């Protein structure tokens, strides 16, 4: 969708539909007041007779309102006036976009950025509108055969504002780039495992590199990884007929500055290996590559925005399947770092591919390294689907990610990785075990990874609860692309070193 900005009045703008906010208890937003006055109180009459109460997400489409140039006016409920929350706002934008897209209005204008959300700026509301609108319009169709084009879909959205036009345009552009990155992450994640293989991911990375001059893509095959000593990563792919790939996307936007390295777990399908998962909902294990998908989306977004920063995406990609050559419980493998690992559970494979990718990341002389992984079911028990888990060996980095999560409303919650937990990973037969028992599963998984990050500032995002939805609404969310892009934007603005 295309986005534009204007200072025209909501009553005079030439558009297929103009959307304005209304609140509970009959309160009107400034633009709704303007339309109400111009139409001799028509909006108030509609509200007074109970057609819309103003609750968040309610909508009412009006036609041919007197005194308004647009043939349609969409009333959008936004909750209590001056108490609209971020979730209220997102619900309102989702509802607005859904109705507009079905209304026949291909060109619409929104006044919703004028409402008050405590502690949120006008530009935040504009950016969030673009992100949420694109999420509402996203529809997976790639492997469907009966897709018919929609008649008159919503194609253009104009922000009506009294704020600085250039800043508003920048906010819309930023939101659109983040939304595009989220949709890329969604599309990759939603593909089935027989399509989205490690080789397919590598091909998509090459295509992204071809689309942007600022991105250089490198692919390592299994032979090259073996030469580097990546015995831990390669042990996971042994059970699969699909060869593993180590994908690197290097975005150069800031000369010789040390890069931020994003390491994304790319398990394109995880059956658990010999420690086989239950069959129920195993199809959702195609989402075990959502960490890698978020790196794809973030790299694409920052390239679209041409941000002045260096970012390297490192993606270890494999399948984890049972086979005569697959890892067995009790096997011992040697990582790229030279540490030996006792595999007590083959379903704890994400950390086995990530640890070698983390060691590999050191060659880029990173300022910070952030890994993103659907790593543990335990994080869903701890935090549900609202927040991603955060663990770090550097508190300033953790604080920056927490701040970016709050700024973007793509939030994280920090968990400890104290030395007290490390003993759970003790092994009688190797340097480290790949699981630490039933207690604190998310924490001990991060503690495992921390053994391979001693030489740089590192943070771990466990996104198992936030990367996709199950049930009737099954599908990838595109998170945490907003968080990661916000972290990079904040990092550029603060010009801070860790």
Image (cartoon, rainbow, N blue to C red):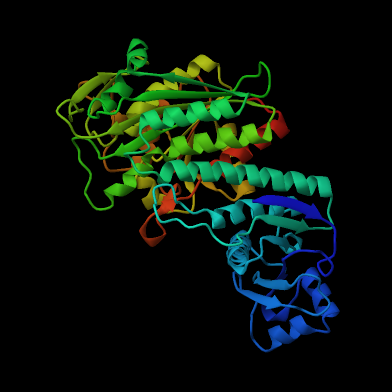
Residue 72 vertical placement versus 255 (above, below): below
Q: Nearer the viewer, residue 347 or 459?
A: 347
Q: Nearer the viewer, residue 239 or 194?
A: 194
Q: Residue furthest top?
A: 227
In the picture, the quarter occupied by the C terminus is top right
Residue 89 vertical placement versus 444 (above, below): below
Query: Could you tell me which residue is drawn at 68 percent across and 31 percent down?
Result: 307
Q: Residue furthest left?
A: 324
Q: Would you identify the image quadrant in which residue 194 lies?
A: top left
**Relative image position of residue 447 (x, y in whole percent):** 39, 31
| Residue 271 seen | yes
Q: Is residue 96 left or right of residue 297?
A: right
**Relative image position of residue 247 (x, y in whole percent):** 44, 24
Q: Is residue 83 left or right of residue 142?
A: right
Query: Could you tell me which residue is drawn at 55 percent across and 26 percent down?
Result: 209
Q: Would you identify the image quadrant in which residue 162 lies?
A: bottom right
């Amino acid at each position: 969708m295309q986005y534009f900005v204007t200072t025209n009045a909501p009553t005079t703008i030439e558009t297929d539909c103009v959307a304005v906010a209304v609140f509970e208890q009959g309160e009107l937003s400034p633009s709704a007041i303007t339309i109400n006055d111009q139409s001799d109180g028509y909006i108030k009459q509609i509200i007074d007779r109970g057609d819309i109460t103003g609750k968040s997400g309610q909508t009412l489409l009006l036609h041919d309102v007197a005194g308004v140039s647009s043939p349609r006016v969409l009333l959008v409920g936004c909750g209590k006036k001056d108490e609209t929350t971020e979730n209220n706002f997102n619900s309102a934008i989702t509802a607005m976009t859904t109705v507009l897209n079905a209304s026949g209005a291909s060109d619409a204008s929104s006044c919703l950025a004028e409402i008050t959300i405590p502690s949120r700026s006008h530009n935040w509301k504009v950016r969030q509108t673009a992100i949420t609108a694109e999420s509402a319009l996203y529809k997976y169709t790639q492997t469907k055969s009966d897709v018919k084009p929609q008649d008159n879909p919503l194609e253009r959205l104009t922000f009506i504002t009294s704020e600085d036009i250039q800043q508003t345009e920048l906010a819309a552009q930023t939101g659109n780039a983040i939304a595009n990155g989220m949709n890329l992450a969604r599309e990759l994640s939603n593909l089935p495992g027989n399509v989205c293989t490690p080789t397919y991911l590598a091909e998509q990375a090459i295509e992204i590199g071809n689309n942007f001059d600022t991105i250089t893509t490198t692919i390592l095959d299994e032979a090259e990884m073996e030469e580097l000593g990546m015995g831990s990563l390669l042990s996971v792919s042994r059970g699969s007929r699909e060869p593993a790939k180590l994908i690197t996307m290097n975005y150069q936007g800031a000369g010789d500055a040390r890069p931020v390295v994003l390491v994304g777990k790319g398990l394109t399908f995880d059956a658990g290996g010999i420690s086989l998962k239950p069959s129920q909902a195993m199809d959702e294990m195609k989402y075990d590559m959502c960490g890698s998908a978020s790196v794809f989306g973030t790299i694409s977004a920052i390239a679209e925005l041409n941000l002045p920063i260096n970012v390297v995406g490192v993606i270890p990609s494999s399948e984890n399947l049972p086979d005569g050559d697959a890892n067995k419980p009790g096997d011992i493998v040697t990582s790229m770092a030279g540490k030996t690992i006792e595999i007590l559970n083959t379903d704890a494979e994400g950390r086995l591919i990530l640890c070698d990718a983390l060691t590999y990341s050191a060659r880029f002389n990173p300022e910070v390294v952030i890994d993103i992984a659907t790593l543990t079911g335990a994080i869903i028990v701890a935090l549900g689907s609202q927040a991603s888990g955060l663990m770090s060996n550097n508190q300033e980095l953790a604080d920056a990610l927490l701040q970016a999560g709050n700024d973007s409303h793509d939030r994280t919650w920090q968990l400890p990785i104290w030395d007290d937990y490390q003993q759970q990973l003790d092994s009688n037969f190797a340097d480290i075990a790949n699981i630490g028992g039933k207690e604190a599963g998310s924490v001990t998984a991060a503690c495992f990874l921390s053994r391979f990050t001693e030489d740089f500032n590192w943070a771990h995002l466990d996104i198992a609860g936030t990367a996709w939805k199950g049930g009737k609404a099954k599908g990838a969310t595109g998170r945490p692309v907003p968080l990661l892009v916000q972290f990079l934007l904040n990092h550029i603005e603060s010009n801070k070193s860790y």
